[in-house]
Image (spheres, rainbow, N blue to C red):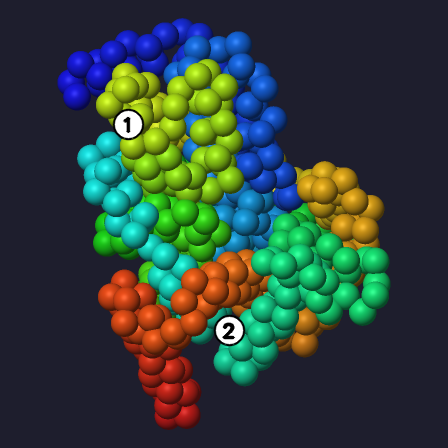
Amino acid sequence: MTEALFAGMDQLFTLPTMATMLLGVVAGVIASAIPGFTITMAIVLTLPLTFTMDPLQGVATMLAVYVGGYSGGLISAALLGIPGTPSSVATTFDAFPMARSGQPGRALALGIWASFFGALVSAIILIIAAPPLAMIAVKLGAWEYFSLIIFAMTVVASLVGKSMLKGLMTGMLGLFIATVGADPMMGVARFTFDFDLLANGFPFLVVLIGIFAVSQLLQEVEDAEQTQHGKQLIPANVAFKPLDALRETLTYPINLIRSSLVGVFIGAVPGAGGSIANLLAYDQAKRASKTPETFGTGTPEGVIASESGNSATSGGGLIPMIALGIPGSAVDAVLMASLMVHGIGIGPRLILDHGDLVYGMFMAMLLAAFMVLVVCLFSMRLFLRVTDVPRSVIVPVVLVCCVVGAFALNNRITDIYLLLGVGIFGYILSKLDYPLAPLVLGVILGPIAETNLRRALMTDEDWTLFFTRPISLTLLILAAVSVAFAIRHRLRQRRSEQTA
C-alpha cells in the first residue's frame, strides 16, 4: 500500500498533470455555473482530450472537472436562484435568499468552504474505506433501492412551504410528469395523447431549468416592471470575506460532518447521485436544527448542508467503481471508459493490479478539492460583479443560456417548447403560492422508484420482501419516522401560531 501510494504521488505531482488538473477545475466550475450544462456534459467533452495523456493524468484531469463541477453549481444557485446543476437544487433554498438580502458574498463564501470540506471528507473516506463501503453498496437490490427512494421522498415534507396540502399536490404532479413518455422498462408510450411533443416525455433537466430558471426570470421581469426599470437582480454589495465565512462554517461541525457523510453514502449507491444527496443532506439538517423555521429564509445551516452534501458524492461515487467496477453515476461510467481506453481492466482486481493508479486517483481527489478552493476564492469577486449587471441585460442573457442548454441535451427543438411551457407553468404555480421544489423532487425520483419497484416484482412477486429484507425494512422504518417527525413538527408549529 505504501509503495503504491508513493508511486501514485510520483506520477501525480508533475507539472503537466498539475497544469491539466488546474484547467479541469476551472472548466468544471465554469461549466456548472451555466444552467443546463451538467457535470456529465463537461466530463464527456473532456474525455477525448485525455486520450493522448498518461492514464493517471487523463483520469486526474477528469476528476478535477468532476470536483470543480460540484462546486460551480453554487454560483448561479446563489446569485440567480437557478441551480447550475441538478445537485444544486437545495442550495437555492437558502443561498439565494441570503444573496437577495444583501449578502451575496457571504452566501458564496459559505458554499465554497462547505463544498471544500464535503469533498475533503469524501476523499478521506474513499482512501480509508472504499472496499468495505463498496461491499455494502453492492448488496443493495431493487427492493433496497425502492425503499431508499421512498425514504428520499420524505424530503417533500421539509419542502412543502406554508401548506402541506399544496406541497404534496406539487410532489404528486412531479411524479405524474415523470410517467409521461416512454415506459422505462418496456418502451411503451404513456400519457402522450398522440402528441409528438410528448413522445419523449419531459427530460428532467428541461423541467429543472424551466421550473427554476424560466419561472424565476419571469418573476424578475415582473419585479422590474413594478419597481425601477433595470434594477439589479440582487443588491450590489460585493463584500467577500472568506475567513469570516470559514469561522462561521466551522461553528456548525455536526451539520458539516453529517451532511458530508450523507453525501458519501448516497454517492456510493449506484444511480443515486448528487441531486438526492443535496436534498437529503438539507432535509436532515433542517430536522436536526434548533431553528428549522429559519430554513428557506437564508440560514447558513442550509447552505452548508446542501453544498457539503452534494460535493461529498464525488468521492462516494468512486467507491463502487474502484472496488467493484460498478459505476456509481454517469460521470463514473465515463471515468471507467477513459481507463478502458488506456487498456486498464475495471473490476475487483483494479487495486491489486494497478495500485499506483488507484492511489494516484485518491490523491487526485484531495488535490482537486484544494485546487477548487483556491480557484473559487480567487474568482468569486469576479462572479460577484453579476450584482452590478441590470436585470434588463442579465435576464435575456440567462434565458438564452437556458434555451441553448435545453437544446444541447438531445438536440431537439421540441425540448425548447417544453422548456418555455414548463417555465410558464412554474411561474403560475409560484404566483399561486405552490412550492416548486416538491415537483422537481418528484420528477427526479419518480423514474428511479418506478424502475426499481417493477424490477423487484419481476424478480419475485412476493411484495413482503420489501419488509423482510433487513436493509429495505430499515429504510422504510426511517421513512416512516421521518414522516412522523414532520407531522409532529407541523402540529407543534400550528399550536405555537395559534397561541401567539
Note whether residue 434 is visible: yes
| Residue with the most extreme left position | 2
Secondary structure under the numbered disc 2 in the rendered image: loop
Q: Is residue 357 above or below residue 430?
A: above
Task: Please name the residue shown 26% across and 49% down the image.
Answer: 136
Q: Which residue is mark 1?
A: 349
Quadrant location of the C terminus in the rendered image: bottom left
Residue 24: percent from the left, percent from the top? Answer: 50, 23
The answer to the question of whether label 1 and label 2 lie on touching residues, with beta carbons closer than 8 A, is no
Q: Amino acid at mark 2?
A: Val
Residue 481, x across and y down, in percent: 30, 76
Determine whether the residue tagged by mark 1 lies in a helix, strand or loop: loop
- Residue found farthest to the top: 15
Q: Nearer the viewer, residue 369 or 86?
A: 86
Q: Horizontally, is 134 left or right of 409 in the view?
A: left
Residue visible at 48% across and 56% down?
90
Q: Position of residue 152 (x, y in %)?
A: 42, 64
Q: Residue at x 56, y 71 (%)?
A: 171
Residue 95 appears in the rendering: no
What number is the disc on residue 160? 2
